[in-house]
Amino acid sequence: MRVGIDKFTQSHPVQMADNCKFLVLSTEDFTLPEAGRIAFSASIAADAVNATPYDYRDGFAALVLCDPVNGWVCDLCTSGETVFAITERLRYPGVTTPFTNLAGRRKDRSRRAGGRAPRVPQDRHGHVHRAPGRRRCQHVPARTGTHRQLA
């Protein structure tokens, strides 16, 4: 499937609520095995036009796997310049430690001058702001409200 999307603009002041611009859902449910594994795969590509280079929030394509009953989400993503995965446990009733984890890698694997990974700027609430050239960051459990840079 090939999808061409018209230019998007920010439509919600909260970044997380503004993420999904175009979502295609399967009409098929998948039964999970009691033990063992289940596998899904897809070939995806993206061209993030006029996006901030290597900023995973500024346009990407993803294969999204969601367990809406238990609140688990796994996204395999690319912005064209960056590949990354997001795993989440949503704030559902009975979930004691919701979280969002992000692991990613720039395809060129470069770093800033001096070999340091770029700093991830945050506001007083622990929300991450745009940081061009960021390597990887991880959102630790939601109850702490912080982000930290990974080496």
Image: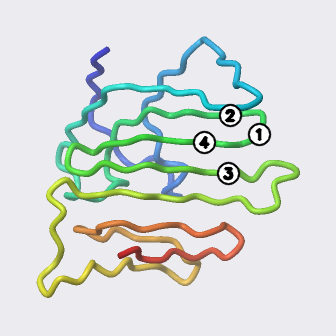
Q: Camera-side residue: 4 or 11?
A: 4
Query: Where is residue 80 drawn, in percent x and y?
Result: 21, 43
Say left or right for 116 vs 108. Answer: right
Check contact, mark 3 vs mark 4: CB within 8 A.
Answer: yes
Q: Gap between marks 4 and 1, in whole Å?
A: 9 Å
Name the residue that disc number 1 marks.
Answer: 70
How dense is the environment of label 1, judged by Cα within 10 Å: few (below 14), some, or many (20 and up)? some
Query: Where is residue 95 drawn, in percent x and y?
Result: 81, 54
**Residue at image coords 15%, 67%:** 110
Name the residue that disc number 4 marks.
Answer: 73
Check contact, mark 2 vs mark 4: CB within 8 A.
Answer: yes
Q: Earlier in the sequence, mark 3 or mark 1?
A: 1
Q: Quadrant of the N terminus?
A: top left
Q: Quadrant of the C terminus?
A: bottom left
Q: Gap between marks 1 and 2, in whole Å?
A: 6 Å
Name the residue that disc number 3 marks.
Answer: 89
Check contact, mark 3 vs mark 2: CB within 8 A.
Answer: no
Label 4: state its secondary structure: strand
Give the amino acid at mark 3: Arg
Which numbered marker is on residue 67? 2
Query: Does 4 appear above or below 71?
Result: above
Q: Gap between marks 2 and 4, in whole Å?
A: 6 Å
Q: Earlier in the sequence, mark 3 or mark 4?
A: 4
Label 3: state its secondary structure: strand
Q: Gap between marks 3 and 2, in whole Å?
A: 10 Å
Label 1: state its secondary structure: loop
How dense is the environment of label 4, judged by Cα within 10 Å: few (below 14), some, or many (20 and up)? some
Give the amino acid at mark 1: Asn
